Image: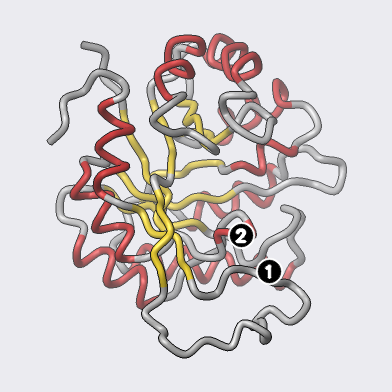
Amino acid sequence: MKHYFFEVCANGVESCMAAQAGGADRVELCTGIPEGGTTPSYGDIALAREVLTGTRLHVIIRPRGGDFLYSPLEQRIMLKDIEMAQRQGADGVVFGCLTAEGDVDTGLMERLMEAAQGMSVTFHRAFDVCRNPQQALEDIIRLGCDRILTSGQQPTAEQGIPLLKALQKQAAGRITLLAGCGVNEQNIARIARETGIHEFHFSARENVESGMGYRNEAVSMGGTVHIAEYTRPVTTKKRVQETIAALGIPLQ
């Protein structure tokens, strides 16, 4: 049987625990899911490290949502966050930086990677908004990153199958491609079959209803940005198991 590797995008310690129980090999811990993921708190990282006994812990290093062009101040924040993750025992970190022209910011990446020595490094979905993915792939390989998280520059990895397949061929075993965004029980087998990729990133989340009896839904904590504040998405053991099983791997 072909070996596959499964990473769950965990939006908190509760999701980390469900990911591990469901058979995930690794979690990417982050907060700010509506923004595409931002750096989790010290407490999240510390407690995740405590509860993850058989699952690797990677921490996203992203000081804000939006683009991937970082100011000198934001760069200093990222360096401090890498240091924090390392001190808390994270196995890896996840970051990606671009220039104003849409290319990989190799200078900043080198500084961040030097700070992350001893940890695995994933170049995240900043890759999906770069100008030239083929050139970016070569730049990231030269930098020495371990893997690239990508949806093939499409809204979902399933839609990105053509580019994912081409990039997997171009990579030729020099770096791992981690297919992510919209990967689920229904499409993971197709993505694997058509691209040849063997590492997958998915959230396996379900909405959990708030325990609040009294609700004032007229007020939004985001001001003019309205989100569902009386439900929260959480990774479930069942969905992790079902996504893994969709590749013919027996449920644990």
Q: Is residue 112 above or below residue 223?
A: above
Marks 2, 1: nearer the viewer: 2
Q: Is residue 118 visible?
A: no
Q: Nearer the viewer, residue 146 or 4?
A: 4
Q: In this view, does 100 lie to the left or right of 71?
A: right
Give the percent coordinates (x, y) of residue 97. 68, 49
Looking at the image, the residue that sits furthest to the left is: 252
Instruction: Identify the mark at residue 184; answer none if there is no mark.
Output: none
Q: Crowding near pointer 2: few (<14 within 10 Å), some, many (20+)?
A: few
Disc 2 vs disc 1: Cβ atoms closer than 8 Å?
Answer: no
Hey, what amino acid is under mark 1? Answer: Glu
Q: Which residue is drawn at 27% across and 71% down?
A: 47
Q: Residue at x 68, y 69 (%)?
A: 74
Q: Which quarter of the figure is the N terminus placed in?
A: top left
Q: Nearer the viewer, residue 214 or 174?
A: 214
Q: Is residue 104 above or below residue 218?
A: above
- Disc 2 target residue: 34
Disc 2 element: helix
Q: Which quarter of the figure is the C terminus placed in?
A: top left
Hey, what amino acid is under mark 2? Answer: Pro
Q: In this view, does 8 lie to the left or right of 183?
A: left
Q: Earlier in the sequence, mark 2 or mark 1?
A: 2
- Disc 1 target residue: 74
Give the percent coordinates (x, y) of residue 232. 46, 66
Give the percent coordinates (x, y) of residue 35. 64, 59
Q: Is residue 196 left or right of residue 249?
A: right
Q: Crowding near pointer 1: few (<14 within 10 Å), some, many (20+)?
A: some
